[in-house]
Amino acid sequence: MNKPISQLSRRTFLASGLASAGLGLTGCAALSGTQDKQLRELTHNSDKAWAGARKILRETKTPHFPKRDFLVTDFGAKADGSNNSQAFANAITKCHESGGGRVLVPKGEFVTGPIHLLSNVNLHLEEGCTLLFSTNPKDYLPVVFTRWEGMEMMGYSPLVYAFQQENIALTGKGTLNGQADEFTWWPWKGGKWKSGKNWSKDGVPTQDAARKQLERDAEANRPVSERIYGEGAQLRPPFVQFYSCNTCLIEDVTITRAPFWLINPVLCQDVTVRGVTCSSLGPNSDGCDPESCKNVVIENCYFDTGDDCIAIKSGRNADGRRLNVPSENIVIRNCKMRNGHGGVVIGSEISGGARNIFAENCEMSSHDLERGLRFKTNSVRGGTIENVYFRNIDIGDVQTALVIDFGYEEGDTGQFTPTVKNIEVRNLRCKNAKQIFNVKGYERSPIRNLHLINVQFDQPADVGKLENMDGFVAKNVSIAGKPFSI
């Protein structure tokens, strides 16, 4: 009987380079024909799990609106460079008070401050329409109830925001342009970012002090109403954030030049993100980050981002544990990823846990794609990640194909040991990887039941490492044309 990896030595399951005898990790045995029964059982269990994904697709509700349009130009909006915030607010309020419908934005460039959606309103951007969001931080005050890197606070309004609303949508073939760049919003990040670019600007304060203070506020359980991080805090707002909303749709729009995360539904139920293009290469430009959400579908989207393409989250540290709401029942399908820190990611703000996550029929490739499938946590974040299924994933160029990282940021310095279990990767092909694996649990908390089935790594430069695992299975896995298994 094979020993679980958690019981084997570090040396046995580390590969710092290509093994001379066919790239396999040292100590791995050839696939046994007697294991066919186990493969059938794994496939049966996988089929049952994916039936759950189909159930999520059926049961995730999408909004419906009366066939009634409210044209923003009828409320004074003009494509002449003037600020149209009030015209948008008036149109949205009228639509809401009339029982709902579409707030229609025609072709043209419309400057605006933050847009706050109300129940039963679909903000629809016609093809050829561009919303140019103000780069004056004062326009995003007064502060609103928001979440920033998994911690609740009163901060700058997201550019498109909804709080405790239902039946809402952001649709159409138009573009939302946050106008962030090396002179606006992004310098607040400070330090160096992607490709060593330095976002700091002389005389421009950064987020560092406020970020540390917010962490202290959260750890001390300071009331959110007293966590005020507006002017002077330099905490950049998310682009689109629906907070504690139900039945939400974001469809077909293009989102670019974001100050911070692009799409961030928080504590929402029944969220659909469909046909959206996320293109923003600034610092922390995550594409779509569902946070403590239930019943989420992300499909037919394109990501070219300065951080994770899709990152599933559930709150950070004490704040995540205080709310204790996992992200669950999420289906990702038919998406394409290019640049990013990770393609499909779970973490790092994951203290509330994540479960029942499915990703299928996705393509990802770029010399600047750092990781393909990525889990990131540590003993400060904690949380349980379980029941995650990937299938039919095509990775072209990537730096590391599969990462399960228990040493993210603070590392093993906390009292909240994470749990990662029941992960299946099926029908994955990776053409070019600098490294295949960076998978490492804790000895006290090994990664449990990681299954690789029908997986092919064509041209890896390095195998990488598999450490502290229990119940690891590799079936029909090849590395550079050579069979790999234990």
Image (cartoon, rainbow, N blue to C red):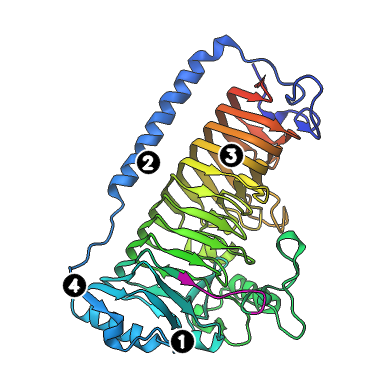
Picture quadrant where residue 206 is located: bottom right
Residue beneath label 1, please? 81
Mark 2 or mark 1, which is nearer to you? Answer: 1
- Mark-to-mark CA distance, 3 and 1: 43 Å
The quadrant in which the N terminus is found is top right
- Does residue 289 show up? no
Q: Position of residue 201 (x, y in %)?
A: 74, 79
Q: Secondary structure at mark 4?
A: loop
- Mark-to-mark CA distance, 3 and 4: 44 Å
Magenta residue span: 176-183
Residue at 69% in and 36% down? 468
Q: Amino acid at mark 3?
A: Ile
Label 2 neighbour load within 10 Å: few <14, some 14-19, many 20+: many
Q: Amino acid at mark 2?
A: Ala
- Does residue 47 show up? yes
Residue beneath label 4, please? 68
Please tell me which of labels 2 and 3 falls first in the chain.
2
Residue at 31% in and 52% down? 60
Q: Amino acid at mark 4?
A: Arg
Residue at 36% in and 66% down? 127
- Mark-to-mark CA distance, 2 and 3: 22 Å
- The disc at residue 53 is 2
- Mark-to-mark CA distance, 2 and 1: 46 Å
Residue beneath label 3, please? 395
